[in-house]
Image (cartoon, grey):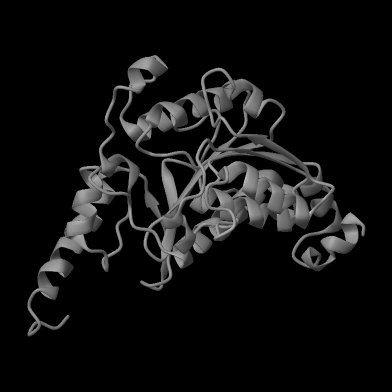
Amino acid sequence: MSYSQQFERNLGFFSSDEQDKLQSSSIAIAGAGGDGGMLAVQLARLGIGEIRLADPDPFEIENINRQAVCNTETIGVNKARAVGQYLQKINPEANISIFEEGITPQNTAEFLKGADLLIDETEFTIPAIGVGLAREARNISIPNLTAFNIGFGAVVTTYKPEGHKLEETLGIDENMTLEEVAKVEVPLARWLPYLPGYGDIQVLEKVARQEKPAPSVAPGVAIAAGAAATQAVLNLLHGENKRKAPVYASNALVIDVMEVKARIIKYNRTSHYRYLGQLLVRNMLKLNPKTSY
């Protein structure tokens, strides 16, 4: 079974030259859980030739509602290893590297060395990891794509090496050491420029206080993975065959299928509070069954 046979059905939306470029590309994905794991599967099926996966956590029973490769047989198995083994079955010729220890200050440079694109799917509650990755990506001049699912949709953006910095988005002094960044508590308003109007404000308030993990559903993860995989392709193929540029920070691509909308918004706190206000109004109206809107 040849590479051309495996990915022949991609042709028509990719040229042969573009498919060859995808085969020769290397993508490093930090985080192999919900969005990261599903995204890795999408990229493998697009024919990416090298994929690196980093995640220190094992699958748990609560992951089964949405995370690729999580099933009753992989509970307790390291996420990066389980996803990597699955990718190898999709494309045995792909170069799959696994970092079961996750991302650390000691292995960040090794994880990104020679990669064409970083995809950061690490925990937003641990900003030092994301900032460390972002700084190394800028150091070696590769784009840093981030994506997360929210409800039945996703928020996706790319940080150019010479453009808007992740630290600016998070409100972190770019001169801080990673040790100092680790002590910073980044408010949810910095991470979430968009909130769906159908969300439960009481649950989201508990998430903001870090009293419970963020809710997440399988369709949202699939949409985030599809959107991020497409933006990854644009990062790799931008400029070829008149391919558009990806959405760059400080803008973000927002897709919400439940709300039937897709738009580009500013990735900032103002946007967060605007959507939060709409969410509060909707939740208040839900409490009054006589009110229609």
Q: In the rendering, at what x and y percent does residue 270 appear?
A: 24, 46
The foreground one among 221 and 73 is 73
- Label count reads 0
Q: In the rendering, at what x and y percent does residue 135 appear?
A: 51, 23
| Quarter-of-image position of residue 178 | top left
Point 48% across, 48% down: residue: 147
Point 17% across, 58% down: residue: 202
Point 47% across, 65% down: residue: 218
What is the quadrant of the C terminus in the image?
Answer: bottom left
Note whether residue 254 is visible. no
Left or right: 79 as drawn, with respect to 23: left
The foreground one among 40 and 188 is 40
Left or right: 124 as drawn, with respect to 58: left
Q: In the rendering, at what x and y percent does residue 25 appear?
A: 75, 41
Left or right: 57 as drawn, with respect to 74: left
Vertical order, 243 against 176 (above or below): below
Q: In the rendering, at what x and y percent does residue 229 appear?
A: 61, 54
Vertical order, 171 against 2 (above or below): above
What is the quadrant of the N terminus in the image?
Answer: bottom right
Point 48% across, 24% down: residue: 132
Note whether residue 43 is visible. yes
Vertical order, 99 against 191 (above or below): above
The foreground one among 288 and 78 is 78
